[in-house]
Amino acid sequence: MMKSISILIVILASLVSVKSYGFDEMVTFDNPKQEAEYRELIKELRCPKCQNQNIADSNAIVAKDMRAKALLLLQEGKSKQQVVDYMINRYGQFAHYRPPVNIATIMLWAIPVGFILMCIILLWRRSRLSTQVDNATDTAGLNSELDNLLDEVSDLQNAETTRNNP
Amino acid sequence: MIPELGNFALYIAFGFSLLLSILPFIGLRKSNMGLMQTAPNLAVGLFVFTLFAFLCLVFAFVTDDFTVLNVAQNSNSALPVQYKFAASFGSHEGSFLLWLLMQSGWACAVAVWSKSLPTTMRTRVLMVIGWICVGFYAYIITVSNPFDRTLPFFPVDGADLNPLLQDIGMIIHPPLLYMGYVGMSICFSFAIAALLSGDLDSTWAKWSRPWTAVAWGFLTLGITIGSWWAYSELGWGGWWFWDPVENASLMPWLVATALLHSLAVAEKRNAFKSWTVFLAIASFSLSLLGTFLVRSGVIVSVHAFATDPARGVFILVLLAIVIGGSLLLYSLKAGLIKSVGKFSIFSRESSLWLNNVFLVAATIIVLLGTLLPLVHKEIGLGTISIGEPFFNQMFTYLIVPFALLIGIAPHIRWKQDKPNKFVATPLIICLASVALSYLWLVVEFGEVKGLAWLSTSLFWWIILFTAVELVKTTQKVRLTKLPLSHFAMVLGHVGLAFVIAGVGLTSQYSTERDVKMFVGGSESFSGFDFKFVKLQDVKGPNYDGWAAQIDITQQGQEVSTLLAEKRFYPVQRNTMTEAAIDATFFRDIYISLGEQLPDKGWALRLHLKPYVRWFWFGGIVVAFAGALIVADKRYRQQKSSVRVRSSAAAEIV
Amino acid sequence: MKYKLSLFLPLFIFVILVGFLLKGLFSDPRQRDSAVVGKSFPEFQLPDLMNEEKVHSLQTLRGEKVLLNVWGTWCITCKYELPFLTKIKTEYGVKVVGIYYDQNHAPEFGQFANIPQIQVEVKQLLAQLGDPYQFHILDLDRTLSLDLGVTGAPETFLMDSNGVIKAHHMGDVNERVWRDKLAPIWNEMQ
């Protein structure tokens, strides 16, 4: 019983934190560039109170305060990066959805790039080994997909014949 | 009484899964045909009893049986009946029963629709499914039983389903998604069965291709519907957030897409065979990993279920056994696979290899982005967040070569082709795409944004190339004679083109504005005029609220009348924004109603989202491609091309 | 049989991954390190909750180690930690200062906190559950809280006599948190 109550509490707690999507402030901008920067910023900054939401989508008080502060800093002439740094200084690297580059996070870029390069080298070597492709069936006039298609069509007819004459 | 029956049925189903994992095994060992023949019957039995258990749970929900803990926590007597049904899989326990229903359903489908397979192969596949099921059924009856009672002190009424889940999306999205996740277990089982038997020629690829296509189609549809649901229900107009739970569904999809393509090579050209086996294992492994992430609470997500460490450990052990075991088997056996098909660097094989490379690279990106924050924290480097800026950047880089490849690859011959044939046409199409999209953006938006130009150029590149390919092909083969799988390819590629264009256009040209409006007041925004006509009370079955009636006109022409709602659900004391959407194929007007301000005005957020529908439209078209592959007669009539093997007894199981 | 080592790579990666997932299972995913620990306490000029004439600043706080507790009467968890904070004040002589965090104050929408009412509520609540605070800094527009990286209430900071933040705890302070996390730092502090 105790266990189920504690589960219930967890459920309730999680519901409260998901519920509030929305907005309720009216924002005005000095110019379109500022608006664009503001919109980008509030999508890139993470609400530190919420499960996993940016400050644009969250209605938590801290998200509202961060939005207001971001706008204020932009109006003071700060650049987008300065606003991000301002928030990171207070809320930590956690508050920015773009990870910092360090020894661990470099893997985010290194592994995919390394993987692609490795695979292309592999392909190069593999196809070199088999450059002696059998050219007997290579009838030049046919369209690329066509020989394969004819294959498939005959497959299809075979299938039909077998079904009709089991 | 009914919940006890359901519980009992679950235990029986567990028994069936045990038998399914043991009897066929002995049968194969001893070449006992009788024992092998039990596999399909056991699979059907497994499904029947799981279905019965599921119906019992649905019954408990529909009849408001609050003596069942699961019902008491996730339903309420005032909840409309369709949501009571949805609530039966809205919780952790219930959704896992749905998962099992799908799993046993797939097993049953294999039992019924694969009569043309050699008995040993079919037995082995079902046996592998049985092994997976044993773990899952053990999990549900030990730590996640949906029929647990609240007795003797049961509540008068239930705690209600989270209002966010009270939506048509909740009724269709989880079943579709689970069909996809669990469906990956079928190609997985085929691959494991092939590894076990050592019978790794290209026939297993041919057999598992239609199953993979169905599962992939469901997964595509599930993800698409999920995105649409988030968009229409959450009230902030977003449709993809790179949340861990979304990523968990994207990873198996990416791998399954790669698998579908490499299965074609394995089947037709006898190449990439060991790689294909790996992809089949990976697609189901990633489905399981996704389940673990959602259910264990290891990662912070908006959608996570309420979590319990005991369950987390159980699933992790299950994960370690299933994935670890199959990867071990792969490492030991895959060396024996010989891919004999030869090809040169400029060939269809190479281009499909590149397709696989890009898709797997995308999977690696998503996997790293999802799990690195955890690793980063555990090795003591502190908490970081990886989100939209990272994923968007990486996917933008990746989609360019991928889309270029999609256009050109269907024109390249198998084995070997001449690169110099591919100069004139691509050049013309490239210029045409760039010019067409430039014109499009200038005419429609008056301003050309780089990323939008890129995405629409890729859109035209794929569309034009596909059209050229279709025209060339139909000059040689009559349209009606073309195999359906060829149309599947066309649809799949065209669908993706729509997704690319939709994402590019809506992310670059969407506009939004927060306004304060009084009843009777007007605002104009992005060429439309919005008039706040009236505010009316709304009385729903289990909520109260207000609806703001907004009339939209464009240069005096009536466009639409929308009702943007604010709902209050008293049971959970939740306020929900119910966005009002006027959708056409080319743009959405999206209005959400905010708070009432102290001066009696209302805060409203107006969005204009051009081409946002193309994303879901593309997704549905892609999913339809999966259906076409299955409909292809070649896969329904398999006996003709199957070489029946009878040496099973001599082989290791 | 001959084995290809490269085929074991996926298995190897998976085993490492399981290790991390297992470790992750037993740590709280929401626990984060604070960005302000080790930095000096931010400058501020804010009124006293009970007496708006009186202004507090970093200068008035410096010189003595202090526990700063971000709280509000609207915050349910805060009520649970009041008795414990009172206990550590009386038993260990910890100087506790409140930073009053109001969630309704939003002048840009024309919403203003009703300060006399808050004063009444605070007095009632503290009389009922125990009063650990020497005084309360009224952070009405939550600027100090933003500078401190506060995500909500309750949160607790330990500041040494030089004005350097030594600890930042998110969530309530209870017996376990105090014993395992805060007390060791507090006892080391100047």
Image (tube, coloured by chain):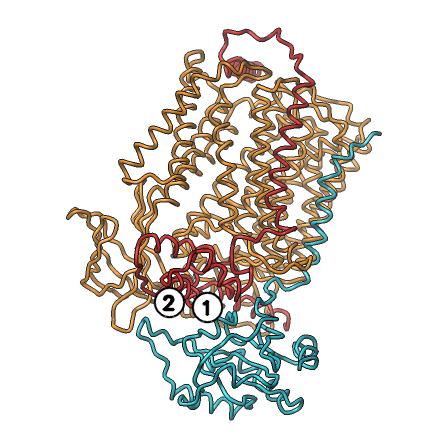
Chain colours: A red, B orange, C cyan
**Residue contact between numbered discs 1 and 2, judged by CB atoms under 8 Å:** no
User: Considering depth in this image, is C47 or B42 the residue closer to the camera?
Assistant: C47
Q: Position of residue B287 (x, y in %)?
A: 60, 45
- At horizontal 49% and vertical 14% (from top left) the residue drawn is B421
Q: Can residue B398 be seen in this snapshot?
A: yes
Cα distance between the residues tagged 1 and 2: 23 Å
Q: Residue furthest right?
A: C1
Q: Mark 2 is on which residue type?
A: Phe
- Where residue B364 is drawn, which disc sits there? none
User: Considering depth in this image, is B131 or C137 the residue closer to the camera?
Assistant: C137
Q: Is residue B577 left or right of residue C156?
A: left
Please say if C140 is above or below A16: below
- Image quadrant where residue B152 sits: bottom right
Q: Position of residue B122 (x, y in %)?
A: 68, 31
Q: Residues within 10 Å of mark 1 (few under 14, many from 20)?
A: many
- Where residue A62 is drawn, which disc sits there? 1
Disc 2: which chain?
A: B
Q: Quadrant of the C terminus of chain A?
A: top right
- At horizontal 40% and vertical 90% (from top left) the residue drawn is C53
Q: Position of residue B375 (x, y in %)?
A: 66, 54
Q: What residue is shown with label 2?
A: B568
User: Considering depth in this image, is A8 or B271 the residue closer to the camera?
Assistant: B271
Disc 2 secondary structure class: strand
